[in-house]
Image (cartoon, rainbow, N blue to C red):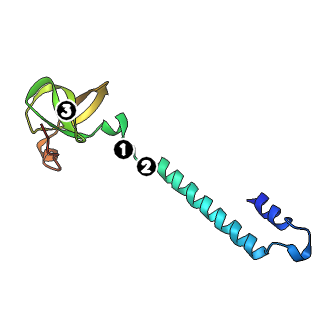
């Protein structure tokens, strides 16, 4: 920015061909403001919550697609996943993801109070 202002001021040596100082100042202020706005947006983006990948799946709520004990299908984020649970689960029951191993999710059943909050509708 400093180089832009100095370069603009000494652009032409002749007194009758100088660049207007208000034009230089206005352009410099506009450019500095734009860069500050862009930088603030990038900083804000870095602080947002992760919405994809393994980090987003941990703690997510899904719905059991059919009765199973041990391993079976669940519906999570509009996708069918293979889930592992050490407790028997019934179709329509809500579960929470506790860990991920490859493409298998380890889940735990949700208590009934959390179960009714916002249950996604599973598709076959």
**Residue 45 at x, y = what percent?**
48, 50
Mark nearer the N terminus (3 vs 1) = 1
**Residue 96 at x, y = what percent?**
22, 37
Task: Calculate the distance from the C-alpha at mark 3 to the C-alpha at mark 1.
Answer: 21 Å
Q: Name the residue beneath numbered marker 2.
A: 48
Q: Does residue 78 lie above or below 106 as drawn?
A: below
Task: Calculate the distance from the C-alpha at mark 3 to the C-alpha at mark 2.
Answer: 27 Å
Q: Is residue 60 left or right of residue 13?
A: left
Q: Secondary structure at mark 1?
A: loop
Residue at the (49%, 47%) spot, across then down: 46
Tell me whether the residue at label 3 lies in contact with that at label 1, contact meaning CB atoms closer than 8 angstroms: no
Q: Is residue 55 left or right of residue 85?
A: right
Tell me whether the residue at label 2 lies in contact with that at label 1, contact meaning CB atoms closer than 8 angstroms: yes
Q: Nearer the viewer, mark 2 or mark 1?
A: 1
Which quarter of the rendering shows the C terminus?
top left
Q: Nearer the viewer, mark 3 or mark 1?
A: 1
Q: How many marks?
A: 3
Q: Which mark is residue 51?
A: 1
Quick one: which residue is furthest to the front in this view? 17
Quick one: which residue is furthest to the right in this view? 14
Which quarter of the rendering shows the N terminus?
bottom right
- Disc 2 residue crowd, few under 14, some 14–19, many 20+, Cα 10 Å: few
- Disc 1 residue crowd, few under 14, some 14–19, many 20+, Cα 10 Å: few
Task: Calculate the distance from the C-alpha at mark 2 to the C-alpha at mark 1.
Answer: 9 Å
- In front of the other: 51 or 113: 51
Q: Which mark is residue 108?
A: 3
Residue at the (91%, 75%) spot, across then down: 15
**Residue 5 at x, y = what percent?**
78, 64
Q: Does residue 42 lie above or below 50 as drawn?
A: below
């Amino acid at each position: 920015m400093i180089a832009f202002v100095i370069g603009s001021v000494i652009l032409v040596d002749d007194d009758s061909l100088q660049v207007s100082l208000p034009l230089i100042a206005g352009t410099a202020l506009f450019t500095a403001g734009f860069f500050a706005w862009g930088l603030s947006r990038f900083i804000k983006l870095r602080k947002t919550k992760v919405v994809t990948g393994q980090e987003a799946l941990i703690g997510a709520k899904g719905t059991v697609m059919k009765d199973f004990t041990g391993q079976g299908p669940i519906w999570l984020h509009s996708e069918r996943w293979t889930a592992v649970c050490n407790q028997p689960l019934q179709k329509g029951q809500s579960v929470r993801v506790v860990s991920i191993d490859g493409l298998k999710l380890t889940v735990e059943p949700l208590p009934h109070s959390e179960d009714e909050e916002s249950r996604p509708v599973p598709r076959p």
